Amino acid sequence: MSTDNIRNFSIIAHIDHGKSTLSDRLLEVTETVEKRKMKDQVLDQMDLERERGITIKMQPVRMEYHSQNQDSGIKIQESYILNLIDTPGHIDFSYEVSRSLRAVEGVLLLVDATQGVQAQTFTVLEMAREAGLVIIPVINKIDLPVAQVEEVKEEIVELLDCDPDSIIAVSGKTGDGAPELLEEIVKKIPPPQSEAVSGKSGVRSLVFDSEFSTHQGVIAYVRVMDGEIKKGDKLSFVAGGEKFPVLELGTFQPEKRPVDKLSAGEIGYLMTGIRQVGQAKVGDTIIDPTRPLPAIPGYVEPRPVVWASVYPEGQDDFNNLKQALERLQLSDASLSFAEESSNALGRGFRCGFLGLLHLEIITERLKREFSLELVIATPTIGYRIKNMRTGKSESVYSPHLFPDASSAAEQEVHEPWVSAKIITPPEYLNAIIKLFNDHEIALLSTINLSSSRVMVEVEMPLRELMRNFFDNLKSVSSGFASFSYQLSDERLADVTRLDILVNNQVVPAFSRVISRRRAQTEAEAAVERLRKIMPKQLIVVKLQAKALGRILAARSISALRKDVTGYLYGGDVTRKKKLLEKQKKGKKKMQARGSVNIPASVFLKMVSSEK
Ligand code: GTP
């Protein structure tokens, strides 16, 4: 089929606005998936996606569409190949969205008719605009009785400055509007243009995603930009340098289906047989090394937002964990990791994530897909510490390496800030603004989007965002406020290290970085938490929390009363007294040494994320 009859597009939207459900209807209308095989959100293929009802991975699928046009009363049928990429809506997976946008010429911007424009709608729209894509506005869920079609249309017109009649109204549930939408796609989205470098011919494909298969090695998901690829062709990765013969190539239907060739403008997969996963990275360009073409500009490396140490529960699993992380990184290029070790936990990895949901999903995938038992430390953010004497800066991700109060005067601490948008019905605005003081939020502007939605633009420290801000926002707005953010700049931070001492010994694994003004509250909460989970010992255990150079909270756990005389029969008082005296002396000695054996279970509970 000629390139003129190919259309490549993504569906983008705020979370849960119905991308995957609308994709189901498009697959049905085009008869891509047989009726008997159709299930809800068929493109969400991972068990985890189906269980949680969220899309985590982008998913490409190829459809054949036969457009029926009327020209001067004559019916004309024209066939098209439509390559659709369904994308995740949650902000933690927005790197998936940005990558998918580089493989397409247009997007369907979906807005839920019951929710209207939400915070993440702005973020994905900005991404599509930056990529210079054609945007088709679509209003979804029009079947619902509470749908506010006209009002939401006005919001979209305001957002895109578009003609209200260009907005396609659909229901992903009933399929209403799906045929009209397909017509709009072939009409509005331009066919792919070959980016051929003038005067040169060759093969050039962008790797927008990949996965690892035990049998076929790395499988690269590609958008062919120039030339034609056939089975057996010997190609190479420009940046990775790795050469490979194409073992199999094909398209997504949505399951992989082999084809003879992939031409410029098409989207498909290449089985490479490469087992060195580091050599075949997402964002790289695949070329024919005998007719080299310049690389397509790669993706911007994502900046992790939170960090967490991940350790295997048994040290024998260290290599398995390493291999698992490498393979997961192939299908999730936003995951980063580096080796580290800890006295308490052994060898493990410090991993960077795009948010707390990302962390949760990755650790769940490590457990399920690789059968690993893991210890996940409390997530932290990174701080930049500038030594005022030397002028040198270093990044610190582990709280126990953060400078304590004694050296605070010589150091300047910088922390990441985010700029964020909150969209809410106006009746919750006051309750939301009350949260601002507690979370150190600066209000920048308030804009009325419509009579039923206000947008608030704010700035806040990332540290405060991670301190349950999102949950607090949802709770004060009864779940109606939506939120999106991006890292902005670095600012001076008013923070301190909180240490926990057990019988006067600092336990490094329990240290945390907290806001100075919350030091007292956090100190009390930490000591109380430890008191609850620490089992009694033979001696009295003193728990203290220290910050700002002093002890801010203290509790003690009384000693375990062990019955050392229980086995004695009768009333031999002298023997009883002797034994009790011996026990007292023993306890005195232990108390003087002060050593407390913190059970592994307490470590795990204390360092594990509280989620
Ligand atoms: P993420 O990718 O996780 O952001 O979700 P999504 O945008 O793909 O949304 P999804 O298709 O999973 O739909 C979210 C919820 O809305 C599901 O419960 C769907 O059944 C429901 N839904 C989607 N479209 C419609 C629609 O047109 N009408 C009705 N009534 N419900 C819909």
Image: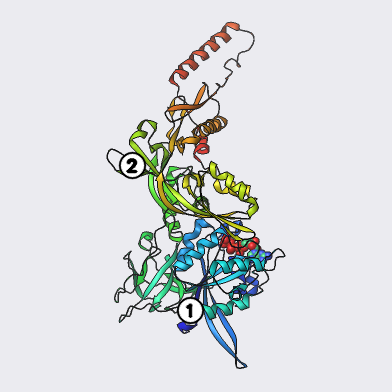
> For the residue marked with disc 1, what is the amino acid?
Pro
The foreground one among 580 and 65 is 65
Question: For mark 1, what is the residue?
Answer: 190
Q: Position of residue 369 (x, y in %)?
A: 51, 55
Q: Is mark 2 within 8 Å of ligand 1?
A: no
Q: Element at badge 2?
A: strand
Number of labelled discs?
2
Indicate the quadrant where residue 40 lies: bottom right
Q: Position of residue 457 (x, y in %)?
A: 52, 54
Residue 200 lies, with reference to residue 157, above or below; the image says below
> For the residue marked with disc 2, what is the amino acid?
Lys
Q: Position of residue 523 (x, y in %)?
A: 50, 32
State the residue at coordinates (52%, 62%): 122
Is any atom of residue 552 visible in this view? yes
Is any atom of residue 216 visible in this view? no
Residue 540 lies, with reference to residue 81, above or below; the image says above
Q: Element at badge 1?
A: loop
Q: In the visual, does 490 lie left or right of 106?
A: left
Question: For mark 2, what is the residue?
Answer: 386
Residue 71 lies, with reference to residue 152, above or below; the image says below
